[in-house]
Amino acid sequence: MTMKKYLCVVRSPSGKCSPPSPSQMEEMYAKFNAWKDKFEANIFDMGSKLSDAGKVVSQAKTLDGPFVEVKEIIGGYMIIEAESMEKAIEVVKESPGVGSPESSVEIREMMQPPME
Amino acid sequence: MNNNLVEHFFRHEYGHLVAVLTQKVGFSHIQDVEDAVQNALITALESWKHKGTPDKPHAWIYRVASNNVIGTLRQNNRRSEILEQKLDATESIDETDIESMLSNEFKDGILNWLFICCHPSIPIESQLVFALKTLCGFSIKEIAIRLFISEANVYKRYSRARTYLKNHSNELSQLKRIDHSIRLSAVNKVLYLIFTEGYLSSHLEHSIRSEMCEDAMRLTTILVDNSVGKVPESFALLAIMHLHIARLPARKNNANELLLLEQQDRGLWDQNHIHQGLHWLSHASVGDDFSRYHAEAGIAIEHCLAPTFNQTRWDKIVKCYDLLEKTSPSALHRLNKSVALAQWQGAEVGLTDLNKQNTPQWLLDSYQYHAVQSDLNRRCGNIKQAEISAQIAMEMAPTPAIKKSLSSRLKVNC
């Protein structure tokens, strides 16, 4: 079965939350590694975090971004491979990134250019 | 945890780094160091998610943390070249060397830190919180949960120790060997408290409880590994820890309910820890020193070596409680002795012993006292008194787990 690629954009609420304690960090890291091992085949690019700075450019003018809503920021992105959207959802749903109730992940299928 | 990290890597690393780096740049910078270490751990977490755990994780975090400290010192215009040189010294060394240097330096750093925390001018409850926060890497909130006190209270205790140490930062760098010997008892006491707070908290979640016990044991092992800690008192302390940890696996049933000693499956006791306990107890039994830890280890070993509850040598245990009472008198020890006496010579003897004591108010306010009253009275046939005491004990029980355990033991319905 051909694998499709999905771009996952992680959104989290803006504003400072208190930093995790060392024990929370080791728990987060353990969960993350467990997830990564489980879905190794589906993770194409772990992506990275995105900085807060951003602009939206259009013909008319340049606006300050990032541009979703003030109370939401795009925290990072990653690219996963899956045979279907359903499978992609399953992979993302189990990822520690969606652990907190306020954060969400937008999943978009990436269209492949037709083979020559 | 997978990826070649030992369990509790982040928490332990926090403690190591705060201890080592603060001692390098001086106590007046402790807050900066704590922030720098916290940020280094977050950097590690983010970076390792993408790149995987590095081969030399200790060296990796050490570099980031010390760079963070240098950055902060510069930023705050507290530029001191001597300090920076101390931290920069590792720049040119390769990571394998840093790792081996750290493993020695960490042990010395942690140990020295313990002795610094146990400054006689700092109250013991502040020493305890300070050690839990800086050496064990628990947050204020996590300590509050573990000690059953408010976060504000934890913070107050913590700040008290930190302020004292910051204000006396000059004298701290010159801790002499003589200071070490004088403070050794205080260090043992803090380690003992970390252990017992973990062991007795009866917290529902087993992992929370055992974490503190394991940390106390880890630190005590470092202590007895150093010449300053090679004394019978510390050996006996380490023996107690092994002997209690040995019995942890049997303290709960599958439904997560607390089990009484009589109900525990002795086959689940960890023989390796029992052997370790015996080993350290034999090291402790040289010379003339007899500390409270010796007496407590003596009680613990009797339980560990008894093949069944009924074959326990209660006479030996009663003797150990007498010795414990001599080294550190406490009504709680006398209460325990009455229980042991009841096992050895019958409930009537135990009850008579209990009732002739002058019981202080704080013990009358605890569920333990009334639970023992109820149990002994029932065994003596004083059903009415047994039921009254059972009711009081149930009302005072601090957690549902204890309530449940009491209700089956004292034969009352919740």
Image: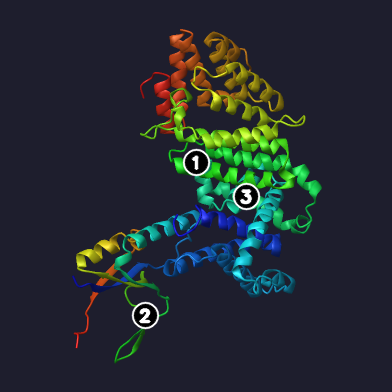
| Same chain letter for marks 1 and 3 | yes
Disc 3 crowd rating (10 Å Cα; few below 14, some 14-19, many 20+) is many
Chain of the residue where label 2 is placed in the rendered structure: A
Looking at the image, which is closer to me, B282 or B110? B282
Please identify the quarter of the rendering in which residue B25 is found.
bottom right
Dot 1 falls on a residue whose secondary structure is helix
In 3D space, how far apart are the residues under numbered discs 2 and 1 (Cα atoms)?
A: 47 Å
> Which tag, 1 or 3, sits closer to the chain's start?
3
**B238 relative to B292, above or below:** below
Residue placed at 28% from the left, 70% from the top? Answer: A106
Instruction: Please state which amino acid type lies under the numbered disc 3.
Output: Phe
Q: Which residue position is annotated with label 2?
A: A65
Side of A1 relative to B315 (left or right): left
For label 3, the residue is B130
Residue B209 is tagged as 1
Q: Amino acid at mark 2?
A: Gly
Alpha carbon distance from label 3 to label 2:
44 Å
User: Can residue B269 be seen here?
Assistant: yes
Q: Secondary structure at mark 3?
A: helix
Mark 1, other Cα within 10 Å: few <14 / some 14–19 / many ≥20: many
